[in-house]
Image (cartoon, rainbow, N blue to C red):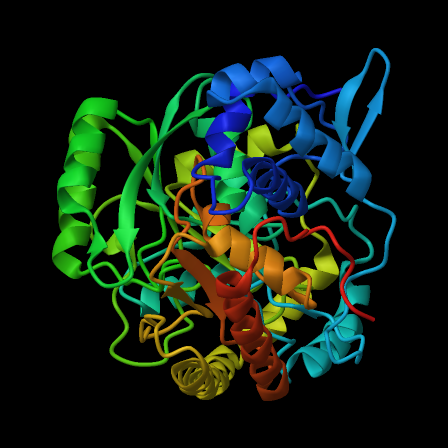
C-alpha cells in the first residue's frame, strides 16, 4: 500500500484555506486531489496528528476533515490500516436541470479526423503483405520512418529514416527518453505549468524536476531558463515550444537559440514535445527546435488525427535511436504494424488534414472566446494562435473550488494545479476549444453557474451533498 507522507500531502494541498470552515476546505482539497488522480486510490493518508503538525492546525480540525471525507465515501478507515483513499459508490453527477448530461472537457482532444476511416480500410488491405514476418517492430516500418523523415526535411530540418523511431504515442516516447537519459536522482528541467503526464514520466524512479515558468502573454522566463541550466545542470530539459500545453505560448526564434546555447554549455539533452506544433491556426510556421541545435523531437498523431491512433515518434541522432531500441526491449517489443500502416496512409494527405483542423479549431476558438466574453467578462481569456486550449486567468485563486463546483453540475475540467507542482496555478483554468458548439455552449453555462456559486457559498455549506436529480 502506498503511504503519503504528511510533508508531501501538505505540498500537494497548496493554498487550501478558504473563507468557510477550515475542516471543510481541507476536506474539499483532498477530495479534488483524489478526483484529479493526484492521490491514487488505495493510498494511506498521514495520521491526523502528523498532518496537523505539518499544516500548523489542530488535530481536531484534521479529524473533522477526515470524518467528512469518510462520510462522503472518499476515505475508508480500518484498524491497523489507517485512512485509505477511496471513491464513493455513487453515479456520475448530473446537471441541475435534470438532463443527466455529463461533459468531460478534462482532455484537450479532437474527434477522429474524417480521413481515418478510409485510411484504416486501405491499411487493412495492405496488411497481408506483412503477415509473413514476425510482427515485432521496435524501430518502425521503413516506409513510415522515411515519410516522417521527409516531413521534417520539408520543415527545415534535414532528416534520414535512421533518425526516426516509431513509438506508441508521445507519452511512450517521453517515458523511453526519460528512462534512458536520466540516471536515478538526476535532474530534469521542465516548464511550469506543463503537461502533467510528462511530469509523471520524468518523476518516475525519483527524478528531480526543476521548473521554469511559462506565461500565456509573456512566454518563457528567459532569466529563469539561464539560471536553471547554470545552477541546476539538468541532464534533460523537456519543453513544448509550439502552442505550449496549457498556455498556448509559442517560443520566439531568438529564445530558441538562447535555449539551445545554454543547454549546449551544460551538456543538457533538450527534448522538444511537438504534439501540438502542427495545430497552427494563425501566423507563420516556425522551424522545429532541432533547427537551432541538436534537440530531440517528439511527435504524435494523437492530437492532430485522433487519440485512438497510438502512433508517435522520436527524431534524434542515429546513435541515440540505436540506444533507445536497445532499452525499449525492457518495456515493450514494438509498435503494431496495422496502426503504422494507417499512419502511413494518413501522411499521404496530412497537409489537407491539418488545413481542416485549422478551420475547425479557428471556429472553436472563436466560439469559446465569444461565449466566455458574454457569460464571464471578468475572466482574462488569451487569444492563442494554435493548439487545442486556452489558459484562462480567473482573477482569483479559486480554480480548485471552481472545478469542484463544476463537477457537481456535471462538467469535468482540469483545475490549474493539475498542470503545476505543489498546488500552484490556482488562478488558472485550462479550457479546451476543440469540442462541438453545443458542448462548448453548455460547458460555459455550467462554468458561469459554478462561478456564481463561489460568491454565494454560505459558511458551513456542504460541498459533499449529492447533485440535484
Q: Is residue 186 above or below residue 100?
A: above
Q: Residue at x 36, y 53 (%)?
A: 240
Write down the quadrant of residue 98 in the picture.
bottom right
Q: Residue at x 42, y 85 (%)?
A: 362
Rendering coords of residue 410 (x, y %)? 70, 68
Rendering coords of residue 263 (x, y %)? 21, 35
Write down the quadrant of residue 391 in the picture.
bottom left
Q: Is residue 157 above or below residue 69?
A: below
Q: Is residue 457 above or below residue 23?
A: below
**Front residue of 186 and 437:** 437
Quarter of the picture containing the C terminus is bottom right
Q: Is residue 309 above or below residue 184?
A: below
**Front residue of 60 and 350:** 60
Q: Residue at x 15, y 36 (%)?
A: 226
Quarter of the picture containing the N terminus is top right
Q: Is residue 176 visible?
A: no
Query: Looking at the image, which residue sits at the far top?
Result: 80
Q: Residue at x 80, y 61 (%)?
A: 92
Would residue 79 appear left or right of 240 to someone viewing this image? right
Q: Is residue 197 visible?
A: yes
Query: Looking at the image, which residue sits at the far front?
Result: 459
Rendering coords of residue 367 (x, y %)? 46, 87
Q: How many marks?
A: 0
Would residue 433 appear left or right of 385 to someone viewing this image? right
**Front residue of 98 and 104:** 98
Would residue 19 appear left or right of 81 to someone viewing this image? left
Amino acid at each position: 500500500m502506498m503511504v503519503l507522507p504528511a510533508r508531501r500531502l501538505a505540498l500537494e494541498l497548496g493554498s487550501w484555506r478558504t473563507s468557510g470552515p477550515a475542516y471543510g476546505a481541507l476536506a474539499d482539497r483532498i477530495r479534488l486531489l483524489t478526483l484529479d488522480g493526484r492521490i491514487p486510490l488505495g493510498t494511506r493518508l498521514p495520521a491526523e496528528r502528523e498532518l496537523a503538525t505539518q499544516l500548523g492546525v489542530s488535530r481536531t480540525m484534521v479529524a473533522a476533515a477526515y470524518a467528512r471525507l469518510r462520510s462522503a465515501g472518499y476515505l475508508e478507515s480500518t484498524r491497523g490500516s489507517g485512512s485509505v483513499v477511496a471513491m464513493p459508490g455513487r453515479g456520475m453527477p448530473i446537471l441541475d436541470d435534470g438532463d443527466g448530461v455529463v461533459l468531460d472537457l478534462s482532455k484537450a482532444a479532437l474527434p477522429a479526423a474524417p480521413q481515418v476511416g478510409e485510411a484504416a480500410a486501405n491499411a487493412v488491405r495492405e496488411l497481408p503483405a506483412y503477415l509473413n514476418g514476425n510482427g515485432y517492430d521496435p524501430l518502425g516500418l521503413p516506409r513510415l520512418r522515411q515519410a516522417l523523415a521527409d516531413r521534417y526535411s520539408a520543415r527545415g530540418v534535414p532528416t534520414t529514416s535512421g533518425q526516426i523511431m516509431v513509438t506508441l504515442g508521445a507519452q511512450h516516447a517521453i517515458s523511453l527518453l526519460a528512462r534512458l537519459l536520466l540516471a536515478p536522482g538526476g535532474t530534469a528541467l521542465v516548464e511550469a505549468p506543463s503537461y502533467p503526464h510528462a511530469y509523471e514520466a520524468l518523476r518516475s524512479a525519483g527524478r528531480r524536476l526543476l521548473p521554469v515558468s511559462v506565461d500565456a502573454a509573456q512566454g518563457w522566463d528567459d532569466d529563469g531558463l539561464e539560471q536553471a541550466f547554470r545552477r541546476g545542470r539538468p541532464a534533460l530539459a523537456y519543453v513544448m515550444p509550439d502552442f505550449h500545453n496549457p498556455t498556448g505560448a509559442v517560443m520566439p526564434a531568438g529564445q530558441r537559440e538562447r535555449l539551445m546555447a545554454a543547454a549546449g554549455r551544460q551538456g543538457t539533452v533538450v527534448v522538444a514535445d511537438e504534439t501540438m506544433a502542427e495545430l497552427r491556426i494563425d501566423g507563420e510556421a516556425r522551424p522545429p527546435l532541432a533547427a537551432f541545435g541538436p534537440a530531440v523531437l517528439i511527435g504524435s498523431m494523437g492530437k492532430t488525427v485522433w487519440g485512438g491512433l497510438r502512433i508517435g515518434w522520436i527524431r534524434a541522432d542515429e546513435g541515440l535511436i540505436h540506444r533507445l531500441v536497445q532499452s525499449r526491449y525492457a518495456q515493450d517489443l514494438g509498435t503494431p504494424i496495422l496502426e503504422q500502416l494507417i499512419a502511413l496512409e494518413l501522411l499521404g494527405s496530412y497537409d489537407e488534414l491539418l488545413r481542416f483542423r485549422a478551420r475547425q479549431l479557428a471556429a472553436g476558438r472563436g466560439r469559446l472566446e465569444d461565449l466566455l466574453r458574454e457569460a464571464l467578462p471578468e475572466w482574462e481569456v488569451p487569444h492563442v494562435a494554435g493548439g487545442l486550449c486556452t489558459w484562462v486567468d480567473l482573477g482569483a485563486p479559486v480554480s480548485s473550488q471552481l472545478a469542484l463546483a463544476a463537477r457537481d453540475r456535471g462538467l469535468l475540467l482540469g483545475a490549474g494545479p493539475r498542470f503545476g507542482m505543489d498546488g500552484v496555478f490556482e488562478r488558472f483554468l485550462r479550457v479546451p476549444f476543440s469540442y462541438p458548439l453545443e458542448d462548448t455552449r453548455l460547458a460555459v453555462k455550467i462554468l458561469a453557474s459554478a462561478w456564481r456559486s463561489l460568491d454565494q457559498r454560505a459558511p458551513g455549506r456542504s460541498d459533499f451533498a449529492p447533485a440535484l436529480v
